[in-house]
């Protein structure tokens, strides 16, 4: 997956498996039922083979023409087009440029259909509810699948919030990437899917989206972790972010810190902290406890690298977001 979302049908209150567990079970146990007739089995096999090959070669979005990487399950009448044309604001897709031009003359959208929760310079973040803006979120998922190998969420968008990153100019807010997260995650997932469009991938926007997911977790007063499995690029991005955050904290606090202390400061789940410190050789296990051991040299090298890195920094004062209130169990909705 991109990083695959826990995308199965909405969970019932008495379910025995979480969304993620159900997805993993389905991925492992991909066995056709015994009573399936040969013709149906052949069609299923044909479908599986077809989805391994990308169907749409290029997509035009605003001023960018992007070569696609993977298959995406657009409706049949669109999936056989070599090139798709998308409205850069509402993400509606077309087979012909003339149809897009006619649409642009009528489309009144100039930003994603949600609340602007962050604005700093020309970067803006919008929170979009998958249930309230279903068509937009489905279109966003179909677009992202063109660049994500294992993404499996396309149409079941209701249980998710989408945080859409845009670059703003006088014409509007132009989509550059996004991440999604489950509204309710029993596994402490603060990110389900993350994608930055190819023209913007050298701007370190992926790191900013990861940081943004943890800043929301801090506001919620909880720790978070991305949903597994992570893609290779996703894993590299997270390891880089975790290392940077942990070394920043260790450089600012000369006193001994516990894993729990660091977790509370960063909103990073303890398991992720431990594995990251282990990968850097900065933690030891002694008498049943994890002990952090960092030399001044390691800290100095980290600070030197940080000074030379140019990436978008999250500005806390620019975040205008309040954690959504959870409805008490058994509460009745009024109309």
Image: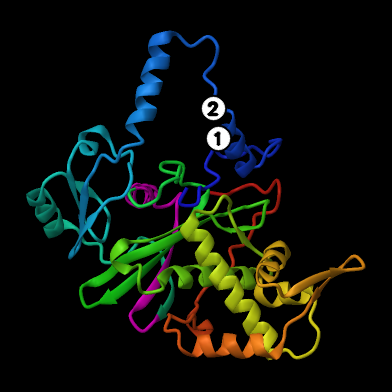
The image quadrant that residue 54 belongs to is top left
Q: Nearer the viewer, residue 73 or 250?
A: 250
On the image, the x and y values in percent for residue 165 come to 39, 68
Q: Which mark is residue 146?
A: none
Q: Nearer the viewer, residue 291 or 181?
A: 291
Determine the residue positioned at 53% across, 72% down.
211
Crowding at label 1, few (<14), some or many (≥20) Cα neighbours within 10 Å?
A: few
Q: Is residue 162 visible?
A: no
Residue 142 is at least partly visible in this image: yes
Q: Residue at x 28, y 68 (%)?
A: 174
- Magenta run includes residue 138: yes
Q: Residue at x 25, y 71 (%)?
A: 172
Q: Is residue 130 left or right of residue 173?
A: right
Instruction: Provide the secondary structure element on which disc 1 rests.
Output: helix
Does the magenta-highlighted stretch encompass residue 216?
no
Does residue 46 sit above or below 158 in this rendering? above
Which dot marks residue 27? 1
Q: Count residues near mark 2 (Cα–Cα under 10 Å), then give few for <14, some for 14-19, many for 20+.
A: few
CB under 8 Å between discs 1 and 2: yes
Q: Nearer the viewer, residue 315 or 237?
A: 237
Q: Indicate whether 301 appears above or below 264.
A: below
Residue range highlighted in magenta: 120-145
Q: Position of residue 167 (x, y in %)?
A: 31, 73
Disc 2 target residue: 30
Residue 133 point in image, percent of width and height: 39, 52
- For the point 58% across and 87% down, the residue is 301
Q: Outermost residue toward the left?
A: 98
Which secondary structure, mark 2? loop
């Amino acid at each position: 997956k991109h990083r695959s979302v826990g995308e199965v049908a909405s969970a019932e209150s008495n379910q025995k498996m979480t969304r993620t567990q159900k997805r993993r079970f389905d991925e492992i146990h991909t066995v056709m039922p015994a009573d399936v007739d040969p013709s149906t089995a052949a069609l299923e096999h044909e479908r599986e083979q077809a989805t391994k090959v990308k169907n749409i070669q290029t997509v035009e979005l605003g001023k960018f023409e992007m070569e696609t990487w993977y298959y995406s399950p657009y409706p049949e009448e669109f999936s056989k087009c070599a090139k798709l044309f998308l409205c850069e604001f509402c993400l509606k897709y077309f087979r012909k440029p003339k149809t897009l031009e006619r649409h642009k003359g009528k489309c009144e959208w100039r930003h994603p259909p949600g609340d602007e929760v962050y604005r700093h310079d020309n970067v803006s973040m919008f929170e979009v509810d998958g249930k309230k803006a279903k068509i937009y979120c489905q279109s966003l998922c179909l677009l992202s699948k063109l660049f994500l190998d294992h993404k499996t969420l396309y149409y079941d968008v209701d249980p998710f919030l989408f945080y859409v990153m845009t670059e703003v100019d006088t014409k509007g807010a132009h989509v550059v990437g996004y991440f999604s997260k489950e509204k309710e995650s029993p596994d402490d997932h603060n990110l389900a899917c993350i994608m930055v469009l190819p023209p913007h991938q050298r701007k370190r926007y992926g790191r900013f989206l990861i940081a943004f997911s943890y800043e929301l977790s801090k506001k919620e007063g909880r720790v978070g972790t991305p949903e597994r499995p992570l893609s290779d690029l996703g894993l590299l991005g997270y390891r880089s972010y975790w290392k940077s955050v942990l070394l920043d904290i260790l450089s600012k606090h000369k006193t001994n810190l516990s894993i729990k202390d660091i977790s509370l400061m960063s909103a990073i789940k303890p398991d992720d902290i431990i594995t990251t410190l282990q990968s850097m050789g900065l933690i030891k296990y002694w008498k049943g406890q994890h002990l952090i051991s960092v030399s001044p040299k390691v800290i100095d090298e980290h600070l030197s690298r940080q000074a030379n890195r140019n990436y978008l920094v999250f500005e806390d004062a620019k975040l205008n977001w309040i954690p959504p209130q959870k409805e008490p169990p058994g509460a009745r909705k009024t109309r």
